[in-house]
Image (cartoon, helix red, strand yellow):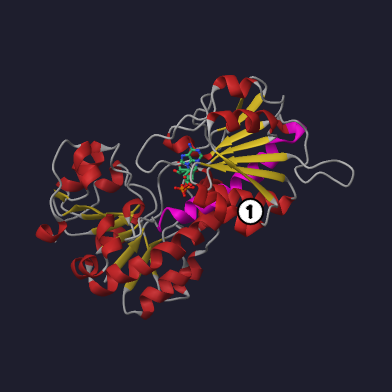
Amino acid sequence: MNIGVPREIKPGEQRIALTPAGARALTEAGHRVVVEQGAGAGSGIRDEEYTAVGAGLAAVDEVWRRADLVLKVKEPLAPEVARLRDGQVLFTYLHLAPAPELTRALRDSDVIAVAYETVQRPDGSLPLLTPMSEVAGRLAVQEGAFYLGRAHGGRGILLGGVPGVPPGNVAVIGAGTVGLNAVRMAVGLGADVSILDVNPDRLRAVDDLYHGRVVTIMSNAFNLQAVVRRADLLIGAVLITGARAPVLVTSAMVATMKEGAVIVDVAVDQGGSVETIKPTTLLDPTYVVSGVVHYGVANMPALVPRTSTFALANATLPYVLDLANRGPREAVRANPALARGVNVWRGRVVHPAVASSLGETPAALDAVA
Ligand SMILES: NC(=O)c1ccc[n+]([C@@H]2O[C@H](COP(=O)([O-])OP(=O)(O)OC[C@H]3O[C@@H](n4cnc5c(N)ncnc54)[C@H](O)[C@@H]3O)[C@@H](O)[C@H]2O)c1
């Protein structure tokens, strides 16, 4: 199969969909890989690293023209949509539910569009979203620690404390992927760490892992009020799958926080779990409400594109190999997780949530593939 990897053109996007390790695996399996010149630069990967493993380099037109399978990171923008051709397979993050125009464009261009974010294992897990949650969770503590610095608007607290001075308090709301990764970093820094969830099994898992080193607390309004008041760094990490994040921390609770405390609401991409949070960008990540520094970056992994590229590509590669080795029709028949990833199949919208955002009934994949 001809596999094309264009450079991402969405402003600020520095990741690339394939690493040299992936290019090598594909060429060894007998496929032809063509990477757009300079596409890896934002992630610190040089063109020669791709050619060294047998991939070709080409200008953007050539990459799109030749590819049977296009590997990307972000949804295609208008100039990219214009390049799609009949029968091409597009494998990338799509987030189509809130983007009916793009859904129609993909349907009209007769492609097979497979979305990273809807690839789902039978146990319900989302293997191509997890790595970005891992990055964001770890980064939440690193960024929070930075903004606690006095010169960065914070309280002037070193999270680990020093002998004779107590550590800072980190409170994490939500013990999923983001929350557990945040806890891991906060513990590593020597902070005093609490975590809240509504699911006692999640709290049990944390308790087993950290043997009491991390305080686990049932998430409810009463407990949140006390936890929020005490926190130096508050991290929002909740998710209700497919829904807006619940607003758990009210502006009245924020008003009780210490001057210079920091809130990193990772759930801001789903509307946020703190009433006073709004989306910000990496160029201007924070603002202050009630004396509390608010960090609302909706695309945190973009701050560390190199790590994010390798994390994402590690997770996508098995599916890429499946698509390339078996061809799309066989691959989705054999791999139910990949089948859940199919949003549009040659003119038919097959993913239920995406179809309902157009007010349509989804086509059955079995019937159209
Ligand atoms: N800002 C970014 O750059 C970025 C990057 C990656 C992920 N995210 C977002 O981070 C959020 C968390 O993602 P995840 O992968 O950790 O999800 P997850 O499903 O693994 O975990 C969510 C957790 O929230 C818990 N929860 C639900 N309601 C709660 C409540 N009322 N109180 C306490 N906990 C509650 C759930 O029980 C679950 O354990 C999502 O909104 C995701 O989109 C943002």
Residue pictured at 23% horizontal, 65% vertical: 332
Q: Nearer the viewer, residue 105 or 296?
A: 296
Residue 99, relative to residue 81: is it above or below? above
Q: Measuring from the top left, give residue 350's x and y in whole percent.
A: 18, 51
Magenta region includes residue 111: no
Can you say which quadrant of the picture contains the N terminus? bottom left
Residue 28 relative to residue 45: left or right: left
Residue 64, relative to residue 269: is it above or below? below
Instruction: Find the residue positioned furthest to the left.
Output: 367
Q: Nearer the viewer, residue 328 or 193?
A: 193
How dense is the environment of label 1, judged by Cα within 10 Å: few (below 14), some, or many (20 and up)? some
Residue pictured at 68% horizontal, 45% vertical: 193
The answer to whether any part of residue 5 appears in the image is yes
Residue 290, relative to residue 369: is it above or below? above
Amino acid type for the residue under numbered disc 1 = Arg
Magenta region includes residue 144: yes
Residue pictured at 51% horizontal, 47% vertical: 200
Residue pictured at 70% horizontal, 31% vertical: 230
Tally of numbered tags = 1
Q: Measuring from the top left, give residue 329's x and y in whole percent.
A: 18, 66
The residue indicated by pointer 1 is 184
Q: Measuring from the top left, give residue 24's x and y in whole percent.
A: 43, 75
Can you say which quadrant of the picture contains the C terminus? bottom left
| Rendering quarter of residue 243 | top left
Q: Secondary structure at mark 1?
A: helix
Q: Nearer the viewer, residue 224 or 304?
A: 224
Instruction: Find the residue positioned furthest to the right.
Output: 164
Q: Measuring from the top left, give residue 365's x and y in whole percent.
A: 16, 57
The answer to whether any part of residue 176 appears in the image is no
- Judged by its main secondary structure, the magenta piece is helix
Magenta stretch, residue numbers: 127-151
Residue 55 relative to residue 2: left or right: right
